[in-house]
Amino acid sequence: MFLTPMIIVIICVAGWPLARTIYFSFTNATLSDIDSHSFIGLDNFIYLMQDKEWWISVKNTLIFTGASVSLEVIFGTIIALALNAHMPGRGLLRASVMIPWAIPTIVSAQMWNWMFNDFYGVINAMMMGMGLIDQPWAWTADPNLSLWAVVIADVWKTTPFMALLILAALQVLPGECYEAARVDGIHPVRGFFKVTVPLIKPALLVAVIFRCLDALRIFDLVYVLTSGSRSTMTMSIYARRELVDFQDVGFGSAASTALFMIIALATVLLLMLGKVKLGGEDGKHG
């Protein structure tokens, strides 16, 4: 009874647009005349599965998700451990670390676009100054570099989010575990992997799930940095191109529905993975 208003709001805000998108995915509707369309069955999905550019967008999205989330876990853990240490000015340092996360994605994407510029960008100037390269790299135009430029910008922006969640988990860890490890003469590095990592694993899994779901639907950062070029085209940009540029509502809705299904499948797999691991730990303790 108390949940009825919330269920109605969810149906109106999320359920209706989703149902309408799924409906259009089985039609030949176009943006110029969306009301006159006919049912064509699975034709849009069959063509989608045969389209090489769709599979390129799937590959780009998976590479981006795997690389960015992995780097964010590593850097986020290092930053969280540093912020958890007792030092003067720790509060100011914590606040300054969160600045990239607070900057709007569009602004940070444009800022990195300037930094990656092959004529006046600071990244090329620094690398040439250190002798790493002998001529400027076209970070956002070279098909071999553009996707990694997006990964670098995303890692810079979202690592603070990961660090914040890990830091919250570190701050509630019982000190007795570390005291026992110190008495037993366990090396700090081994203590980190044997004591700290198992204790923060639930919070770490939640952070990884959030970031994976966010990375799978990446759009704005890629669109501003590379204008959605073929070498960086993600599933969201592919669906947007079919819907807006080509005005093919039916096929674009099929691509959007496929993206929704992939994200839903990833959510279930990640939740099952986390539950299995946690259950395994409980089983060992039992």
Image (tube, rainbow, N blue to C red):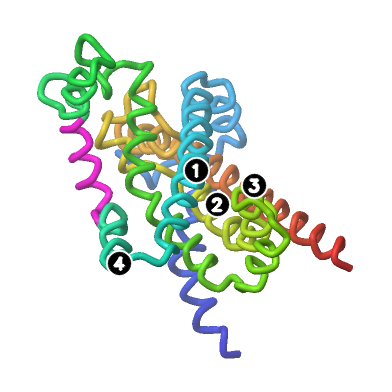
Q: Looking at the picture, how far across and down is residue 163, in whole percent?
A: 44, 56
Quick one: which residue is furthest to the bottom in this view? 1
Residue at numbered disc 4: 88
Label 4 SS: loop
Residue at numbered disc 1: 69
Which of the two labelled residues, at mark 2 and mark 4, occupies the earlier sequence position?
A: 4
Dot 1, crowdedness within 10 Å: few (<14), some or many (≥20)?
Answer: many
Residue at numbered disc 2: 208
Q: Is residue 219 left or right of residue 176?
A: left
Which of these two is toward me, 65 or 217? 65
Which of the two labelled residues, at mark 4 and mark 3, occupies the earlier sequence position?
A: 4
Label 2 SS: helix
Q: Residue at x 49, y 43 (%)?
A: 69
**Given contact means CB atoms under 8 Å apart, are the residues at marks 1 and 3 in contact?**
no
**Given contact means CB atoms under 8 Å apart, are the residues at marks 2 and 1 in contact?**
yes
Q: Looking at the picture, how far across and down is residue 189, in whole percent?
A: 60, 48
Q: Label 4 sits on what residue type?
A: Pro
Q: Residue at x 38, y 16 (%)?
A: 144
| Magenta highlight range | 103-115
* Residue 216 visible at all: no
Q: Nearer the viewer, mark 3 or mark 2?
A: 2
Callout count = 4
Q: Nearer the viewer, mark 2 or mark 4?
A: 4
Residue at numbered disc 3: 265
Which of the two labelled residues, at mark 1 and mark 4, occupies the earlier sequence position?
A: 1
Q: Nearer the viewer, mark 4 or mark 3?
A: 4
